[in-house]
Structures are given as C-alpha cells and as structure tokens.
Image: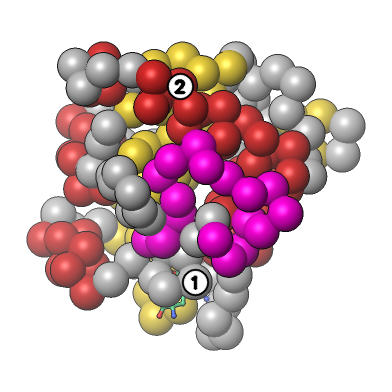
Amino acid sequence: MREFIFKANKTITSSNINLKDLPGSCGRLDLLCRCVSDAFFLSHDIRRDVIFYAVLYGQPNPPVCLKFVGSELKKVSPDERNIAIFVKKALKKFEESDEDQRNDWILSTPGIYVRRNDFRDLILEKINEGKNIYYLHKDGEDVENVDIKNPVFVIGDHIGIGEEDEKFLESINAKKISLSPLELHANHCITIIHNVLDRKGF
Ligand SMILES: C[S@@+](CC[C@H](N)C(=O)[O-])C[C@H]1O[C@@H](n2cnc3c(N)ncnc32)[C@H](O)[C@@H]1O
C-alpha cells in the first residue's frame, strides 16, 4: 500500500466551489486535484493500492480531511474539473453532517470520505497503524538510498508544510527524502515516487 498526506494550506473548506476558479477563490484546489490525478490514474487503469489524504486549512471551516481510496473509487476521471466536482460533493456532505458525525469518516461518494481531522493527528494515527512517515523535501536524503517500507509520504503544497509542522515531523523522526536537487511541484513528486517504487517492484 502507498499512502500520501498532502497539506493544503489554503484550500477552501466549504462547498462554495467555483469550478471556473480552482486556483484563485478555491485556494489552489487545482493543485490538490492534480495530486489526486497523479496519485491514482494510469493510462486506462487506476492504482488500487493507493490511499491519498488531503488536509485542508483554507476558510471558512478548517481543518477538513479528505480521503481517497483507490480500490473503491468509481466514476472519477483524471481531469481536474471532474475531481473538483467530487471534492465539492464531499465538502457538501461534511456541511450537512453534525459535529459528532464529523469525527468519523463520512462516506461521500464511492472511495471518497471526509472527516474533521488535523494534519498532526492524522500522522499520529498512521504511526499507530505501524506506518513509516517519509517527508518529501528537496534537502532530504536521496530517495535511491532509502529503504522504503510501509510508507506514508507527506507532501506540502505551493507554500510547503510550514515551520511548526516541520518541527513536528522532526520530533516524530520522520525520514526526510529528496527526489531531485530542484524544487518540484507536489503532484510531480507523487509521479516520481510511484516511478521509484514501480521500478523497485514495490
Ligand atoms: C512546490 S514545493 C513547496 C515549495 C515551498 N516554497 C517550500 O519551501 O516548501 C511542494 C512540495 O513538494 C515537495 N517537494 C518539492 N521538491 C521536492 C524535492 N526535490 N524532493 C522531494 N520533495 C519535494 C515538498 O513536500 C514540498 O513541500
């Protein structure tokens, strides 16, 4: 299983999504949708061994956590607009739930869940499940030299993950790994990680 946690610092947390303005008024929802696309979609197939989380910190109701499960996804296609429609549905479902229900995963559409959850709590949950946390960062250790087991890959958005959450990742001994000497887009990091693991037969 390959898992990803994407921190979306500015992405909108209401269903008031303007599908014609994903980067602007939706707080880089375009980037989140590209990450989902690159996490799951192959040519004419889908990666069923992937779980992708996005923790949204935009206004008006942060944090909101979305979960996409590859083995359950149906009717989602790789284009940004289509994925944004499913995000909108999930946020609508969240709005219609009461605060108690929000503490557990709420199924929105097949394979897409929504919940009230914080970035750090999600990472601590993953550690409790026996997962290893790998923080993707330009200045980390070269991925080719790292033995990857039971991975959860943490990725920042255009802003990164922020100093406080970097300190948190250090405190839990997350392994910092680099994919390139250059600063890459988050979705490209997902494609590269898949390629590294595919080639290793992981
Ligand atoms: C556009 S970058 C973020 C840039 C942001 N200004 C910063 O300082 O963190 C988006 C994310 O992709 C990942 N990333 C970018 N370049 C990388 C690299 N060369 N190796 C590994 N991860 C990388 C990191 O997780 C980063 O937070």
Q: Could you tell me which residue is drawn at 64 percent across and 41 percent down?
A: 84
Q: Is residue 49 left or right of residue 42?
A: left
Quarter the C terminus occupies: top right
- Furthest toward the left, the residue is 171
Q: Look at mark 2 in the image and give the residue it sits on.
A: 93
Q: Is residue 20 magenta?
A: yes
Against 184, is 134 above or below?
above
In this view of the protein, can residue 7 be seen by the observer? no
Q: Is residue 15 left or right of residue 106?
A: right
Number of marks in the rendered image: 2
Q: Please give the range of residues in magenta.
A: 8-25
Q: Which mark is residue 105?
A: none
- Furthest toward the bottom, the residue is 181
Q: Look at mark 1 in the image and give the residue it sits on.
A: 158
Looking at the rendering, which quadrant does residue 130 occupy?
top left
| For marks 2 and 1 on the same chain, the one whose residue lies earlier in the sequence | 2
Which of 112 and 48 lies nearest the eye of the viewer? 112
> What colour scheme was applied to this rendering of the protein?
secondary structure
Under circle 2, the secondary element is helix
Against 3, is 21 above or below?
below
Against 28, is 158 above or below?
below
- The alpha-carbon separation of the residues under discs 2 and 1 comes to 27 Å
Q: Could you tell me which residue is drawn at 35 percent across and 53 percent down?
A: 59
Q: Is residue 68 left or right of residue 198?
A: left
Which of 168 and 83 lies nearest the eye of the viewer? 83
Under circle 1, the secondary element is loop
**The residue at label 1 has a CB less than 8 Å from ligand 1:** yes
Looking at the rendering, which quadrant does residue 198 occupy?
top right
Q: Is residue 132 left or right of residue 88?
A: left
